[in-house]
Amino acid sequence: MLAQCRRAKTWRPTEAPRTFHQLQATNLTKPPACGSIQHMTDDLLRLTPSGLYCAAGDFYIDPWQPVERAVITHAHADHARPGSQRYLTTPTGAPVLAPRLDPGASIRTLAYGERLTLHDVTLSLHPAGHLLGSAQVRVEHKGEVWVVSGDYKLEPDQTCEPFEPVRCHTFITESTFGLPIYRWQPQAEVFAEINEWWRANQAAGRTSVLYAYALGKAQRLLAGIDPAIGPILVHGAVLPFVQRYRDAGIDQPDVLYANGENARAHRGRALVVAPPSAGGMAGWLRKFGPASQAFASGWMTIRGARRRRAIDRGFVLSDHADWPGLLAAIRATGAARIGVTHGYTGQMVRYLREQGWQAEVIPTRFEGEPDAEIGDAGPADAEERASGEVD
Ligand SMILES: [Zn+2]
Ligand SMILES: [Zn+2]
């Protein structure tokens, strides 16, 4: 590595400001540019066939194959896979992680900010703002600090712990929405649009069917909509997680299981929250009578994604950071070196290098939320957008 990089490595992380907004006010200097890209193979964390591995601490972060010790950033299927011997996650993350693993799986918890020593490494978990209990993983070894973001978003929401920036030398960030076209509007505006759509459907005698990922997005929607408008039904994949959120003290409105009886009783008035796959099942939709279908996802930015799903409305609501959010989070770490996973990795790496960061793609098997955040409406749509076909 060049001298500049060595200098960057000796930089000591300082106490992180409490909130992201405080941090935005802080004037962070741009990290030094580095002329050479060193591959992240002989590093504190390296990529192995089983996933990101820390040899100095002998653990994996979100491994995609069974391992001895797995540190889990959050309970989405591409990050939390069954079969490992021992799991480590946050206390609020454990109840939503457990149903994703084999019964009786060994889950140990570590509170946010608490430090755990594993061999020569100090490990701690920090809020990622993605879903209940989601964490960034901070790994420190001989004064060198790496942070793995997992999935994250910056706008605080009432269903999970708000994102907290963590200073580090190397930051491994997701890049699900790592293109400049992705810019979220404030969630309050999106919830107002959803409420308005629900009311308009009621006036026309239509049931409102809203598709969203069963863990995280569904509970965020339920907490954000106005339950006074009418009855709320939820799909069987959503229901158990609503209860687990309630158990953690997160506000959720009264909901009914969307079985045939409840569907018939509340036809034309109810809001139904279900995973997108439910809409593709023959007969499932029919029980609600005349219905308007909508999908809540960051991918709804792109008209092609709505058209391909044959839905009536797309609400742009994501649990991932948008383009400005990704860049703000990257800057907030103060890291000189950035590893990029998920989604638009190539584009993000190119941009970061142009701006003077030392950046590279980390080819993980994280996919975004299957059936919801990527589904059939991923990068291809962005090209459509870039070509001007999309509004
Ligand atoms: Zn996720
Ligand atoms: Zn992910």
Image (cartoon, helix red, strand yellow):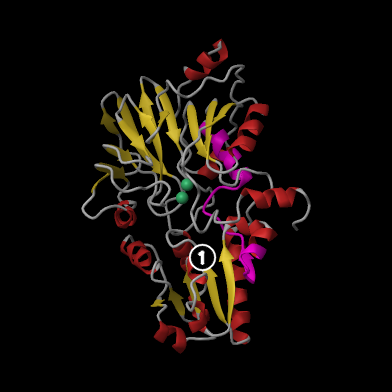
Question: Would residue 253 be counted in the magenta stretch?
Answer: no
Image height of 346 relative to 304, above or below: above
Front-lying residue, 95 or 86: 86
Specify few, some or many for label 1: CA neighbours under 10 Å numbering under 14, 14-19, or 20 or more. Answer: many
Image height of 382 relative to 203, above or below: above
Q: Is residue 71 visible?
A: yes
What is the x, y in percent for residue 27? 60, 32
Question: Disc 1 marks which residue?
Answer: 276
What is the x, y in percent for residue 143? 39, 21
Image height of 113 relative to 253, above or below: above
Q: Residue at x 33, y 53 (%)?
A: 97
Q: Which quarter of the rendering shows the C terminus?
A: bottom right
What is the x, y in percent for residue 229? 53, 80
Q: Which residues are magenta?
A: 307-333
Q: Residue at x 26, y 37 (%)?
A: 68
Residue 55: quarter of image = top left
